[in-house]
C-alpha cells in the first residue's frame, strides 16, 4: 500500500510538472501526441502559431521597391492595409513592411516584401484572418517629389514623350519614369510643368516639325500631378 501511495504521489508530482507554456501568445494548429503517450525532450507535442501578429509575403514590381520603406531600428516601415473577402464581408487589418526578401518570386520575376499584420484575430466578435488564405495588400508608398503625371498613351518606346514647344514644334524627349500605373506614369526628369505633351499618333515624327492642336482643344494644359498633358496633332 505504501508503495502504491508513493507511486501515486510521484505521478501527481510529475503531472504538475507537465504543464507546457509557450513564450508567446499562440493557438494550437495541430497536435502530435495522444493521451497516455510517453514523451521525451525531443518529442514534438504540437504546432503553434503566434496570435499577436501574422506575416504575409507580398509580390511587387522591382521598380516599386524605391518607394517602399522597410522597417529599421530608427523608422517604421511603410504602412499597409490587408483585406480578405469572406462571403459578403471584408476583413481589414493594418500592417507594416518589415523587410525586403533577398530573392525574386520565381513565378513572375517580382520582388517580394514581408508584411507584418497587426492584431490578425481582431476583437471579440470580429472575423479573424485565416492562415493560408489569399489577401489583398495595399502598400503606402513614399511620396515622389516633383513628379509629373503623364498619360501612358503619351509614352513612346517606353521612355520617350513628344512635346509641343512654344513654337508649336515637335520635341522628342527622353524622360525618367519613377512610377508606372495602368493608365499613366509619373515622370521626374525630362519634362517641365506646363509643357504640352502630344498624346495623339504621329505617323512619322521628325524633330522640329510643326504641330497644331485639335479643333476645340485648348492650346495647353498645366503639367501638374493631376493632368499634365495637352492633345496635339501634326
Image (cartoon, rainbow, N blue to C red):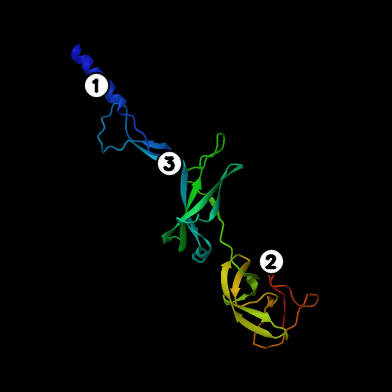
Q: What's the distance in space between the residues labelled 2 and 1, CA to CA?
A: 78 Å
**Disc 3, SS:** strand
Q: Which residue is mark 1?
A: 10
Nearer-N-terminus badge (3/1): 1
Residue 160 in the image: above or below residue 7: below
- In the image, taking residue 53 as reference, residue 221 lies left or right, namely right
Nearer-N-terminus badge (3/2): 3
Q: Quadrant of the N terminus?
A: top left
Q: Quadrant of residue 39?
A: top left
Residue 89 in the image: above or below residue 233: above
- In the image, taking residue 219 as reference, residue 1 lies left or right, namely left
**Disc 2, SS:** loop
**Marks 3,1: beta carbons within 8 A:** no
> Residue 221 or 136: which is nearer the viewer?
221
> Residue 200 or 225: which is nearer the viewer?
225
Q: What's the distance in space between the residues labelled 3 and 2, CA to CA?
A: 44 Å
- Residue at the image point whose x is 65% and y is 76% from the top: 192
Q: Nearer the viewer, mark 2 or mark 1?
A: 1
Furthest-front residue in this view: 74
- Residue at the image point whose x is 55% and y is 37% from the top: 123
Q: What's the distance in space between the residues labelled 3 and 1, CA to CA?
A: 34 Å
- Residue 81 lies, in percent from the top left, at 56, 51
Q: Which mark is residue 230?
A: none
Q: Which mark is residue 226?
A: 2
Q: Which residue is mark 3?
A: 50
Q: Quadrant of residue 45?
A: top left
Residue 190 in the image: above or below residue 14: below
Amino acid at each position: 500500500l505504501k508503495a502504491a501511495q508513493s507511486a501515486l504521489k510521484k505521478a501527481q508530482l510529475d503531472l504538475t510538472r507537465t504543464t507546457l507554456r509557450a513564450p508567446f501568445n499562440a493557438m494550437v494548429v495541430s497536435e502530435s501526441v495522444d493521451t497516455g503517450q510517453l514523451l521525451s525532450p525531443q518529442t514534438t507535442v504540437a504546432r503553434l502559431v503566434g496570435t499577436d501578429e501574422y506575416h504575409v509575403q507580398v509580390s511587387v514590381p522591382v521598380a516599386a521597391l524605391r518607394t517602399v520603406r522597410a522597417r529599421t531600428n530608427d523608422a517604421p516601415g511603410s504602412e499597409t492595409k490587408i483585406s480578405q473577402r469572406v462571403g459578403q464581408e471584408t476583413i481589414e487589418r493594418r500592417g507594416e513592411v518589415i523587410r525586403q526578401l533577398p530573392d525574386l518570386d520565381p513565378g513572375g520575376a517580382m520582388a517580394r516584401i514581408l508584411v507584418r499584420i497587426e492584431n490578425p484575430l481582431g476583437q471579440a466578435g470580429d472575423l479573424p484572418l485565416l492562415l493560408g488564405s489569399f489577401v489583398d495588400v495595399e502598400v503606402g508608398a513614399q511620396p515622389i517629389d516633383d513628379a509629373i503625371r503623364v498619360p501612358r498613351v503619351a509614352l513612346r518606346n517606353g521612355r520617350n514623350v513628344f512635346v509641343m514647344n512654344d513654337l508649336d514644334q515637335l520635341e522628342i524627349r527622353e524622360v525618367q519614369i519613377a512610377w508606372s500605373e495602368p493608365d499613366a506614369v509619373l515622370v521626374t526628369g525630362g519634362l517641365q510643368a506646363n509643357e504640352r505633351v502630344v498624346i495623339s499618333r504621329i505617323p512619322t515624327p521628325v524633330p522640329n516639325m510643326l504641330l497644331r492642336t485639335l479643333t476645340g482643344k485648348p492650346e495647353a494644359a498645366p503639367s501638374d500631378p493631376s493632368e499634365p498633358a495637352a492633345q496635339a496633332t501634326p
